[in-house]
Amino acid sequence: MLAVLGLLLLTAAPAGAVEPHKMTAADKADVARVESYLNGLVTLESRFLQASSNGGFAEGTLYLNRPGRMRIQYDPPSPILMVADGRFLIYYDKKLEQVSYLGLDSTPAGILLDDTVSLSDGRVIITGMERGKGTLNISLVRAEDPLSGHLTLTFEEKPLALKKWFVVDAQGLVTTVSLLDPHTGVTLDPDLFRFRDPNFFKNPQ
């Protein structure tokens, strides 16, 4: 099955010690630019393409409304929907009628959805930085639980913009998500970030 949870949910990372990246002056300047960009990113709507190293493939639409809110809606035939409502990241499999709730602070997604995004205040550990032709990659983990998931963000330079990210699970499976024609500063319907649990309404307490 396609590793849909690899999009922004990881329960374990590859074994081994986490080594912080040795920051240069240029690295620190780039981190400051990324923090400024992410904190200025309030709303975003984008198609996305998700691919995993085991051959899995999916497409869908991503909606982001910082802080705390996100919706990841996969195209059919995938039955998966993920919604961050400000408190939880909710994973819903419509086919299996299964719903899972994870605290935002316990997932890599929380890094992007924090009220204030900071990559230099000790809450995250930057494990690597790499510059390519017109791109900047930053790899990081949460400091309080570094084995909960590795997240690498890829930014396009000039102007700085988030273009893709990838995560690696405990088996070494790599899942990459690429944003296709993202639009920022858009008006989004608040209902996109509300989730009505079908199990609750089916079996009210």
Image (cartoon, rainbow, N blue to C red):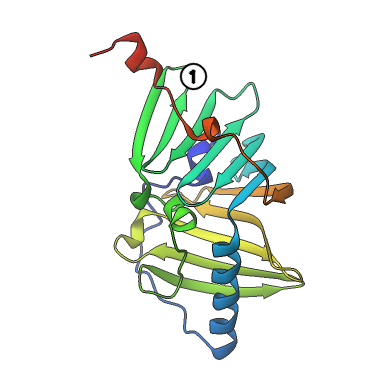
Residue 33 x/y as whole percent: 60, 75
**Dot 1 amino acid type:** Lys
Residue 109 x/y as whole percent: 46, 50
Dot 1 alpha-carbon crowd within 10 angstroms: few under 14, some 14 to 19, many 20 or more: few
Considering every residue shown, the one lying at the far bottom of the view is 25
Q: Going by the image, does 167 lie left or right of 63?
A: left
Say which quadrant the C terminus sits in: top left
Residue 4 x/y as whole percent: 53, 37
Q: Which residue is disc 1 drawn over? A: 94
Which residue occupies the foreground of this view, 168 or 72? 72
Any part of residue 1 in sight: no
| Picture residue at 46% right of the left edge, 78% below the top | 21
Query: Is 141 above or below relative to 178?
Result: below
Q: Going by the image, does 59 lie left or right of 150?
A: right
Any part of residue 133 in sight: yes
Residue 164 x/y as whole percent: 64, 55
Q: Secondary structure at mark 1?
A: loop
Query: Is 135 above or below relative to 175?
Result: below
Q: Going by the image, does 98 lie left or right of 1?
A: left
| Picture residue at 30% right of the left edge, 60% below the top | 145
Which residue occupies the foreground of this view, 65 or 18? 65
Examine the image and state in which quarter residue 161 appears. Answer: bottom right
Q: Going by the image, does 74 lie left or right of 86?
A: right
Examine the image and state in which quarter residue 89 appears. Answer: top left
Which residue occupies the foreground of this view, 130 or 115? 115
Considering every residue shown, the one lying at the far top of the view is 202
| Picture residue at 52% right of the left edge, 66% below the top | 139
Number of labels in the image equals 1
